[in-house]
Image (tube, rainbow, N blue to C red):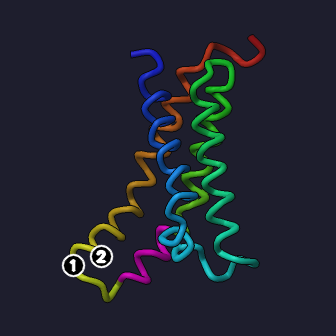
């Protein structure tokens, strides 16, 4: 099973990163308003981060660092998922379910990233 978590997470992050550039508007809407500057900048930065994390997960020597960084990234984007759930509180039941479902989904994503980090080339410094 070596590399399965890392490679599949790299695919997910790569696809998500691409969508931040191809279809940025949905991401712009969930950027918390308390952040300074334009929402689009945060959309692009988070998309670039996802692409960088995906690339890092693909190489055994950077996999551990990328997996740990991805775990931190998933924690960092939690406020955007909470904002989406709050913003969609008056949406249809299906949309509310999707929005609120994204919040606890961060837990298995963090676990997945930590699992991918364990699939590294070995101890740091090797």
Q: Residue furthest top?
A: 126
Residue 28 on image: x %, y %: 56, 73
Q: Is residue 96 magenta?
A: no
- Residue labelled with disc 2: 96
The answer to whether residue 70 is above or below residue 27 is above
Circle 1: element type: helix
Image-based side of 34 in relation to 80, left or right: right
Q: Which residue is mark 1?
A: 93
* Relative side of 99 to 80, left or right: left
Nearer to the camera, 61 or 14: 14
Residue 82 is inside the magenta segment: yes
Where, by quadrant of the figure, is residue 85 drawn? bottom left
Labelled pair 2, 1 in contact (Cβ < 8 Å): yes
Q: Looking at the image, which residue is at 48% across and 30% down? A: 115
Occupied quadrant, residue 65: top right
Mark 1 burial class by Cα count in 10 Å: few <14, some 14-19, many 20+: few
Q: Which residues are magenta?
A: 81-88
Residue 84, image x, y percentages: 45, 75
Q: Residues within 10 Å of mark 2 (few under 14, many from 20)?
A: some
Vertical position of residue 19 compared to residue 98: above or below: above
Q: How many marks?
A: 2
**Depicted 109 relative to depicted 6: above or below:** below
Q: Secondary structure at mark 2?
A: helix
Percent x, y for residue 101?
A: 33, 63
State the residue at coordinates (70%, 67%).
41
Give the quarter of the figure containing the C terminus: top right
Query: What residue is drawn where x is 50% and y is 63%?
Result: 23
Placement of 25 over or under 4, stated as above or below: below
Specify the quadrant that holds the N terminus.
top left
């Amino acid at each position: 099973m070596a590399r399965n978590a890392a490679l599949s997470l790299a695919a997910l992050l790569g696809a998500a990163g691409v969508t931040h550039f191809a279809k940025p508007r949905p991401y712009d809407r969930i950027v918390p308003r308390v952040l300074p500057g334009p929402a689009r900048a945060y959309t692009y930065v988070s998309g670039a981060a996802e692409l960088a994390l995906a690339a890092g997960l693909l190489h055994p020597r950077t996999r551990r660092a990328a997996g740990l960084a991805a775990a931190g990234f998933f924690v960092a984007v939690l406020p955007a998922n909470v904002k989406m759930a709050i913003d969609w509180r008056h949406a249809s039941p299906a949309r509310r379910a999707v929005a609120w479902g994204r919040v606890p989904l961060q837990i298995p994503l963090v676990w997945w990233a930590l699992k991918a980090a364990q699939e590294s080339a070995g101890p740091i410094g090797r």
